[in-house]
């Protein structure tokens, strides 16, 4: 659990460890740690104490009484709930004495007085703590002959989670999770005694982004997840440990399948990363992998549109396009966009193909919504360092929406008083509630906000208290990265010791950039590539798992770029707005269909499991790159994914330690070293006159949007909130339209019609529109060339 | 139905100001809501959540723990007849039977005119005066069918209005604690002085 560094205290053998507590557990002497609960110490000593409500990552409540054991602290043995008491010196614990056993059997008998024995039709049957512990610690029979209580079964407490109240044993795990861990106290015990039940408030469902965790930690079958309900029996599931790549936090997961079909992801407790939690987007995104809309064969464009073809002919066609492009416009007329959605191996193979074989410097893993790659060269913080720093400075998007489990970790740091959060944001975020100070800035002026804030004496005093970690990312897609970059530079100049945790969003964006999916000498960044393509200077545009039309903030630029590129080659899992325009489309293997490694925001490299057979004939991206390289005359020497992993370790700065053996040995992945990147240069932020544009635009992402993975996961797709333009309640009078009415939103580039809504998290003078939602084509208004976007909102 | 009225919101803010943490005001505010509407409405729960900074589910969870908060409309007069041992021995069951006939409803329901709600109650702690009942938590002792009928007649005719207010009113006079005598918004961990209402005896020298 703990990292190896912190355990390195062997040298001082004569010094008595002040944290050692000597206890006797089942007759054996054991040295526990000060503050350990009896239940934890016993488990460490090899004596398992049965329990239902106790959970390592939450506070103890002593609700279920299952962990009663005989404890003697010098006053004679007495039954104590072992999850409620820490060890004390000389304590004698008997977990299997007759009294302990009688207590445990009694509790099981009481719990089963009302718990239905519908195990054969219960999803939890086979992996159920109540079932298991009834066998191992129960009396085997019951004295109760009365009718058990009955409730309507099941009731939906959210779009994703169903509650069967008959099965609930009132352990308080889900309600505690909702309140303590997620901060969404939307489920609660109601009523009292025999009629106690877990419910939501009427018409306020448990719409937490983390609701799926309650299903995983429920010790009975009371909570079940709709996407998994009645799909499999636990003993038919095979699982492999992997890492979620839905965002770049890199939560460890167990990928479970049966008969070669993905059925469930469960969180795995990785101490430095996710603590066992997953967000619902990550947990239920497996639906997208097995979608019927997945691409199964390569496609080439003919006079009749896309036609299915063989890999051989698609490869040949793509290689010819690349050769023709180089012949026509030189190597730099080929550009490669993407790679952040795949594995390190995928990105590395494509980076080598692009830089070495094609010879183009025009490579980018970001899509106009990231930060200059130099941010990865800064003094990088780990998630643990961030969540234990005295001060966390957020210059980042709404982490609850973009990197949900990082939000959980930082929220934990704030509510447990380890850290104080100083937040810079254009709009209130999920962490604003927990921030010590929130400084709202008007987009484009964040550098000024930072300087003004740092000058305040109480801020300076706080920053002097200890470690400072800056979480840096793009809070607003309707402005260029210049404002944020300038603010980040101002922060790092003022706080040279501060560490930086990049809050870039796409699953493997850090890995892709690190292994080479970035511009070479004299190359263009993503916006540069798109501009060049729009100007007709790109002969061949290669999209590696990326959909610029949906994902680039400046939608018009993306469309012009794809129209202006002579040839487009796409590697994708679905036909998207972008891959629809491609001349050749390679079907790519998706998550859980390929092995490899991925890198999270802190640079932690973990393994990806190959759990199910690929869809159709799809192949991992690296294989596509290796084949094309071969056809272009160079053998990359990649016969298997392990070859690529080894090649990364051999060739990439900072990845020397990331070998297959090291990954095999490390439970929590291997932290890659920080390589050097072109440092960030101070950008100039030129804010033009507002003229008659009376609102400054803020555009940011919600967790659920129209992105391809979400859109093809039916359970998640319906959770996307849809688009509207949100203004502060006090600004509504300026517009002269009613809430809910359609209004005209105009920017210099275009005018769109959106419905008007209010939200007091939006700051006055700004308008907020969620990105990539149905009914809000906000990308039309965003200009990649402008520092900020100002809009005019008028009634129709 | 209804959120707290404007006047009651003012009272609510005063109540909240008595506590170091606004959530502590949840139960007094539930009483306030019940006083306003006779029962605690869902809108009031939502409103209280907004006022004290809790989710509606949290307020609901707290409120439903307590028997005396009602979540459905109850009559103007809530009649609780004791059925615990002493009262049962002294004719409590017969009294309930009579009450059901007199009011024409079963225990647990409300008369169609919205005047009376009849309920069983557990021990009302007046066993020497059995059988007992309470009307809006005001006692009546050694109740017989005759005195019960007289009570209902008096209530229906409004003759007891001065003694028994409508359901939900805990007390007709609300205590107003001036700000300087309140504990105020000082969380316990930040308090340096004992609250002004607590006189600390000097230790003998």
Image: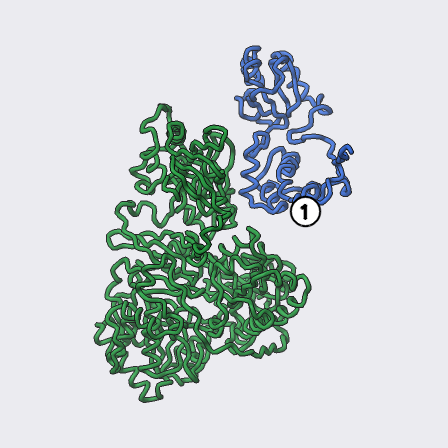
Chain colours: A green, B blue
For this view, does B41 lie left or right of residue A172? right
Point out the image quarter for the C terminus of chain A: bottom right
Q: Position of residue A175 (x, y in %)?
A: 48, 43
Tell me if residue A528 comes above or below residue B86 in the rendering: below
Note whether residue B7 is visible: no
Asked which quadrant contains residue B199, the reply is top right
How many residues crowd around disc 1 within 10 Å: few (fewer than 14), some, or many (20 or more)? few
Asked which quadrant contains residue A578, the reply is bottom left
Tell me if residue B85 comes above or below residue A635 in the rendering: above
Tell me if residue A574 comes above or below residue A414 in the rendering: below
Mark 1: which secondary structure?
helix
- The residue wearing badge 1 is B190
Asked which quadrant contains residue A234, the reply is top left
Q: Position of residue A674 (x, y in %)?
A: 44, 70
For this view, does A377 lie left or right of residue B182? left
Q: Residue at x 61, y 77 (%)?
A: A687
Q: Nearer the viewer, residue A645 or A321?
A: A645
Note whether residue A65 is visible: yes
Q: Position of residue A153 (x, y in %)?
A: 39, 38
Q: Total of numbered circles in the picture? A: 1
Return the residue found at the far front. Answer: A14
Q: Position of residue B114 (x, y in %)?
A: 60, 28
Q: Residue at x 56, y 23 (%)?
A: B119
Tell me if residue A175 comes above or below residue A626 in the rendering: above
Q: Nearer the viewer, residue A436 or A237?
A: A436
Q: Chain of mark 1?
A: B
């Amino acid at each position: 659990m703990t990292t190896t560094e912190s355990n390195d205290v062997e040298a001082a053998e004569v010094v008595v460890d002040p944290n050692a507590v000597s206890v006797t557990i089942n007759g054996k002497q054991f040295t526990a740690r000060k503050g350990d609960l009896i239940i934890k110490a016993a488990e460490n000593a090899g004596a398992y104490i049965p329990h239902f409500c106790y959970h390592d990552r939450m506070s103890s409540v002593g609700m279920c009484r299952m962990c009663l054991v005989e404890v003697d602290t010098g006053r004679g043995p007495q039954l104590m709930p072992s999850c409620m008491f820490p060890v004390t010196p000389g304590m004698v614990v008997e977990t299997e004495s007759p009294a302990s056993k009688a207590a445990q059997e009694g509790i099981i008998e009481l719990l089963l007085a009302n718990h239905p024995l519908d195990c054969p039709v219960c999803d939890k049957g086979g992996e159920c703590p109540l079932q298991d512990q009834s066998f191992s610690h129960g009396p085997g029979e019951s004295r109760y002959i009365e009718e058990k209580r009955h409730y309507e079964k099941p009731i939906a407490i959210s779009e994703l989670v169903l509650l069967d109240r008959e099965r609930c044993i009132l352990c308080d795990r889900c309600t505690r999770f909702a309140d303590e861990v997620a901060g969404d106290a939307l489920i609660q015990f109601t009523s009292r005694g025999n009629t106690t039940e877990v419910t939501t408030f009427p018409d306020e469902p448990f719409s937490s982004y983390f609701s799926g965790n309650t299903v995983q930690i429920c010790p009975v079958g009371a909570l079940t997840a709709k996407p998994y309900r009645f799909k499999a029996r636990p003993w038919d599931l095979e699982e492999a440990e992997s890492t979620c790549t839905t965002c770049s936090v890199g939560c460890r997961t167990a990928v479970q399948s049966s008969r070669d079909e993905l059925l469930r992801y469960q969180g795995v407790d990785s101490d430095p990363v996710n603590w066992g939690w997953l967000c619902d987007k990550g947990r239920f995104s497996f639906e997208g992998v097995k979608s019927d809309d997945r691409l199964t064969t390569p496609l080439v464009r003919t006079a009749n549109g896309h036609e299915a073809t063989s890999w051989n002919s698609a490869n040949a066609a793509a290689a010819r396009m690349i050769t023709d492009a180089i012949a026509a416009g030189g190597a730099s007329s080929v550009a490669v966009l993407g790679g952040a959605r795949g594995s390190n191996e995928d990105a590395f193979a494509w980076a080598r193909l692009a830089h070495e074989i094609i010879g183009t410097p025009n490579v980018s893993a970001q899509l106009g919504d990231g930060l200059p790659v130099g941010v990865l060269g800064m003094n990088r913080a780990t998630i643990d360092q961030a969540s234990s720093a005295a001060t966390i400075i957020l210059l980042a998007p709404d982490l609850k929406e973009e990197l949900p489990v990082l939000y959980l970790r930082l929220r934990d740091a704030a509510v447990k008083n380890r850290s104080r959060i100083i937040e810079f944001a254009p709009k209130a975020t999920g962490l604003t509630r927990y921030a010590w100070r929130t400084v709202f800035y008007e987009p484009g002026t964040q550098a000024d906000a930072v300087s003004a804030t740092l000058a305040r004496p109480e801020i300076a005093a706080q920053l002097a208290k200890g470690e400072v970690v800056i979480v840096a990312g793009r809070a607003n897609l309707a402005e260029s990265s210049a404002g944020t970059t300038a603010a980040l530079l101002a922060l790092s100049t003022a706080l040279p010791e501060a560490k930086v945790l990049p809050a870039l969003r796409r699953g493997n964006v850090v890995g892709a950039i690190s292994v080479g999916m970035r511009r070479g000498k004299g190359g263009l960044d993503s916006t540069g590539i798109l501009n060049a393509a729009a100007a007709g200077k790109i002969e061949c545009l290669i999209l590696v798992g990326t959909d610029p039309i949906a994902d680039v903030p400046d939608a018009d630029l993306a469309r012009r770029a794809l129209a202006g590129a002579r040839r487009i080659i796409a590697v994708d899992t679905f036909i998207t707005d972008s891959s629809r325009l491609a001349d050749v489309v390679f079907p790519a293997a998706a998550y859980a269909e390929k092995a490899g490694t991925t890198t999270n925001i802190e640079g932690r490299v973990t393994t990806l499991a190959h759990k199910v057979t690929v869809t159709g004939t799809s192949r991992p991206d690296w294989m596509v790159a290796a084949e094309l390289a071969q056809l272009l005359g160079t053998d990359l020497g990649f016969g298997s994914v392990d070859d690529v992993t080894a090649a990364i370790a051999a060739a990439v700065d900072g990845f020397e330690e990331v070998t297959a053996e090291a990954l095999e040995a490390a439970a929590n992945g291997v932290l890659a070293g920080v390589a050097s990147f072109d440092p960030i240069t101070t950008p100039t932020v030129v804010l033009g006159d507002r003229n008659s544009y009376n609102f400054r635009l803020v555009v940011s992402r919600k967790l659920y949007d129209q992105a391809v993975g979400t859109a093809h996961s039916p359970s998640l797709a319906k959770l996307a909130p849809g688009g509207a333009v949100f203004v502060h309640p006090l600004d509504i009078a300026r517009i002269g339209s009613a809430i809910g009415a359609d209004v005209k939103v105009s920017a210099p580039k275009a005018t769109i019609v959106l419905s008007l809504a209010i939200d007091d998290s939006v700051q006055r003078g700004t308008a907020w529109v969620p990105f990539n939602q149905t009914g809000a084509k906000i990308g039309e208004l965003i200009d990649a060339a402008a520092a900020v976007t100002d809009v005019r909102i008028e009634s129709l | 139905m209804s959120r707290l009225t404007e006047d009651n919101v003012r009272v609510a803010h005063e109540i909240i100001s008595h506590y170091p943490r606004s959530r502590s005001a949840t139960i007094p505010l539930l009483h306030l809501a019940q006083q306003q509407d006779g029962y605690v409405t869902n809108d009031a729960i939502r409103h209280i959540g907004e006022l004290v900074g809790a989710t509606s589910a949290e307020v609901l969870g707290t409120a439903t723990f307590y028997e005396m908060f009602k979540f459905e409309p109850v009559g103007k007069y809530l009649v609780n007849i004791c059925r615990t041992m002493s009262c049962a021995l002294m004719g409590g069951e017969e009294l309930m039977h009579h009450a059901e006939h007199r009011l024409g409803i079963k225990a647990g329901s409300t008369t169609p005119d919205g005047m009376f709600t009849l309920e069983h109650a557990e021990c009302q702690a007046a066993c020497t005066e059995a059988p007992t009942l309470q009307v809006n938590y005001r006692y009546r002792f050694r109740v017989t069918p005759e005195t019960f009928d007289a009570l209902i007649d008096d209530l229906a005719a409004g003759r007891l209005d001065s003694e028994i207010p409508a359901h939900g009113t805990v007390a007709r006079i609300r205590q107003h604690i001036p700000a300087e005598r309140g504990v105020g918004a000082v969380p316990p961990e930040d308090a340096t002085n004992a609250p002004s209402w607590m006189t600390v005896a000097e230790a003998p020298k």
